[in-house]
Image (spheres, helix red, strand yellow):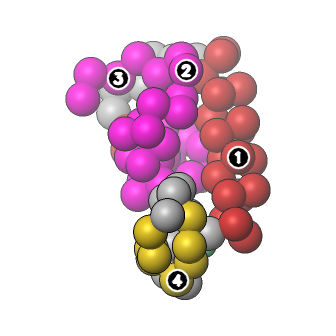
């Protein structure tokens, strides 16, 4: 376990994940939303397009992509 700074809210916490326990549930909601969007439409041209469409912050989006949490994503990065 490492002492880390939460990538969503900036608070310090002890965990192996990127975000604190408060933000973990927000991450899960974002990912569920994104995966349901991508189920219907995975032809976004860029991460920015997906960010605008979903209303989800691009930094969070890039983090989910880096962690391979979006199953249907078909953007060439
Ligand atoms: Zn947090």
Range of the magenta residues? 49-77
Whether the residue carrying mark 3 lies under 8 Å from ligand 1 is answered with no
The label on residue 16 is none
Whole-number angstrom distance, CA of label 4 to CA of label 1: 20 Å
Asked which secondary structure carries label 1, the reply is helix
Mark 1 nearby-residue class (10 Å; few <14, some 14–19, many ≥20): few
Image coords of residue 49 (percent x, y) = 42, 39
Image coords of residue 14 (percent x, y) = 56, 73
Where does the C terminus fall, quadrant-wise? Answer: top left
- Which dot, 2 or 4, sits closer to the camera? 4
Mark 4 = which residue?
12
Mark 3 = which residue?
75
Tell me which image quadrant ligand 1 sits in: bottom right
Whole-number angstrom distance, CA of label 1 to CA of label 3: 21 Å
Mark 1 = which residue?
28
User: Mark 1 vs mark 2: which is more N-terminal?
Assistant: 1
């Amino acid at each position: 376990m490492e002492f880390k700074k939460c990538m969503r809210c900036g608070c310090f916490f002890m965990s192996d994940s990127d975000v604190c326990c408060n933000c973990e549930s927000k991450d899960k909601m974002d990912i569920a939303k994104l995966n349901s969007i991508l189920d219907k439409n995975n032809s976004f041209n860029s991460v920015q397009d997906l960010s605008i469409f979903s209303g989800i912050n691009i930094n969070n989006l890039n983090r989910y992509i880096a962690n391979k949490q979006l199953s249907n994503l078909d953007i060439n990065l």
